[in-house]
Every structure is written in C-alpha cells, then in structure tokens.
Amino acid sequence: MLRLPFRTRVWRGAAGEFAGSGTGASMDFQDHRAYSPGDDPRHINWNAYARTGQYSMKLFREEIRPVVDLILDASPSMFFSPEKEKRTAELLVFLADSSLAAGASVRIYAMNGDAQLAIDPMTLKSGRWQNDIKALAPTTPGAPPEIHRLPLRSHALRVLLSDLLFPADPKPILQTLGQKQGTPILFSPFTEAESAPAWTGNYDFVDAELKTKHPHRIEPATLRRYHEAYASHFNLWKDTALRHQAPLARIPCEPDLIPALYQHALPVKAVETTK
C-alpha cells in the first residue's frame, strides 16, 4: 500500500510504467508533430488528416522504469538493540520490495565508513546479508558513510537508510545524494531509549562503534544537556534536508512498521500510496 514517491518526478531511463521526460507509446497523450517518413502509421492522427489533408503524428508521453539507489548505513549503532536491528531490517526490505514491485531498477549498497558491500535485492529475505554487513571493517570506526565512493546512477532516487548518529556536516552528504540529478530521501530509525531517555544515577555506557564501556553518573543537568544536543543534531539534519528538498522521515522502532510509515513518512512525502 506504500512505496517510494515515484509519481512525484519525471523519469529518464528504460521502459516502464512511470512518466518519462520524452515521448513514447503510452496512452498518455502529449502533443502533435508533422509526419516524417518511417514514423509508425498507427500514431497518425487520421481525424486531422481528414480535415487538413496533412499527415500529423500523435505523441504520447514515454513510460519509464524508475531507478533506486538504496544506501544502508551499516554502522553498529543501526543494530545496537533488538528493536533497532529489527526496524532497520524491516525498512530495508520494505524499501527494496516495494520498489521492485513498482518495476524499479534497484541497487543496494551497505556502508560502514569507507567500507562498502553490494547486496543483491533478491537475497534480502534470506537474512544472510546481516552477517555480511556486520563484518564490514571501516578504517575509522564511527566515521560517516563515505557515499561519494559509490557508483550512484544518474536520475535515481537516492535513499539513505541511517540513524544519522555520526558527527558530520549533513551538507556534503546531501550534496552527494543530489548529484547527477539524483533525488535524496532519508529514512532514520530511532528508539525511544536514545531520543528521550530518563537516565538517573550511575551507568556504564557502551560505545556502539568501539564496544568500549564508559562509566558516568547522570545528574538532571547532564540529562538536559544530552536532550539539547540530540535535538540540536537532528534540527540541523532537518534544516539541511529541507534546503536540499530531501524528505527526512524519522521512523520510531517501537510501533509496527506500516502505521509508523503512515504517521512519519507519508506526511513528509518520503513515501506515497500505491493508489
């Protein structure tokens, strides 16, 4: 019932079912032009010929197969808790399967810093990809995904699936996603434990990337600074995404997937209904 927003843009590429930027053989009438030798006689406007004695051709909008480059942030923070690991897998399968069902050409890349892996979309449901991407070893743990290293295709929907929990300026990432007339879309899973924690007292915090423990005592002022830093981080992402016309859908991990997409992804136009 939901998929990526294919109807909102004009496509270029191989034959498919979505509106292209040129002319083709669909039933969507576009314009007329003069007949040229070799044109398909089935598209001659015979009514116009009866009126004018001149051959003219009916032009129809071409139908194009959409292109989707799906990029998974495979850093350990995406799999830190069972809820987040499950939601990451659900989103990846949803984005791939709904795109394939729409006739899109889909490529999937997993990235952990500068380490990358291509994933066959047809093997997602087997679950073997999860072990493969957890073995990715970046040069610098915790570094943002180096998306500029990927062979991204022209005129593609560039979908980044990431919790965005890395210290980096969003602007270069969104600029890369928008190159070669790409359309960036961001899906960011999060848990309530990270977005609105109620910590108090002594804790051993675990660095998701390095697997190291750090003891801290959380006082009310410390928790307040965390909440402020977390909100500031995602406000920066939201503002930058807005300037680059990139829908940013933050998807909570606790509710079921489809209701969460209807509530958080559909209003920002990161997905559309299929009807």
Image (cartoon, grey):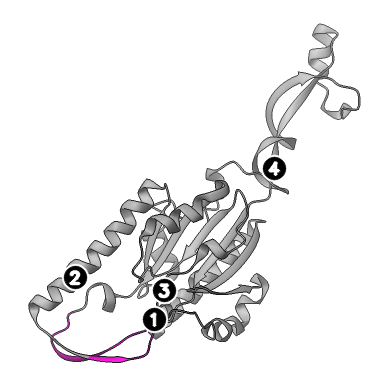
Which residue is labeled 3 in the image?
Answer: 143
Query: Callout 3: helix, strand or loop?
Result: loop
**Which residue is depicted at the point 60% across and 60% down?**
99
Q: Would you place residue 178 above or below residue 79 in this image?
A: above
What whole-number distance in Å separates the C-alpha atoms at marks 2 and 4?
48 Å
Q: Who comes first in sequence, dot 4 or dot 1?
A: 4
Q: Determine which residue is flagged by label 1.
A: 83
User: Is residue 1 or residue 127 the one in the foreground?
Assistant: 127
Which circle's residue, 1 or 2, is located before the other in the chain? 1
**97 relative position to 139: left or right:** right
Q: Which of 188 and 28 lies nearest the eye of the viewer?
A: 188
Secondary-structure class at tag 1: helix
User: Which amino acid does the dot numbered 3 rest on?
Assistant: Ala
- Dot 3, crowdedness within 10 Å: few (<14), some or many (≥20)? some
Residue 152 point in image, percent of width and height:
60, 58
- Magenta residues? 198-214
Residue 212 location (% of width, % of height): 33, 91
Residue pointed to by mark 4: 63
Q: Position of residue 17 (x, y in %)?
A: 68, 47
Give, as a three-letter code, the residue at label 4.
Glu
> Which quadrant holds residue 85?
bottom left
Seen in the picture, residue 122 relative to 244 is either above or below; the reply is below
Q: Give the amino acid at mark 1.
A: Glu
Cα distance, mark 4 to mark 3? 40 Å
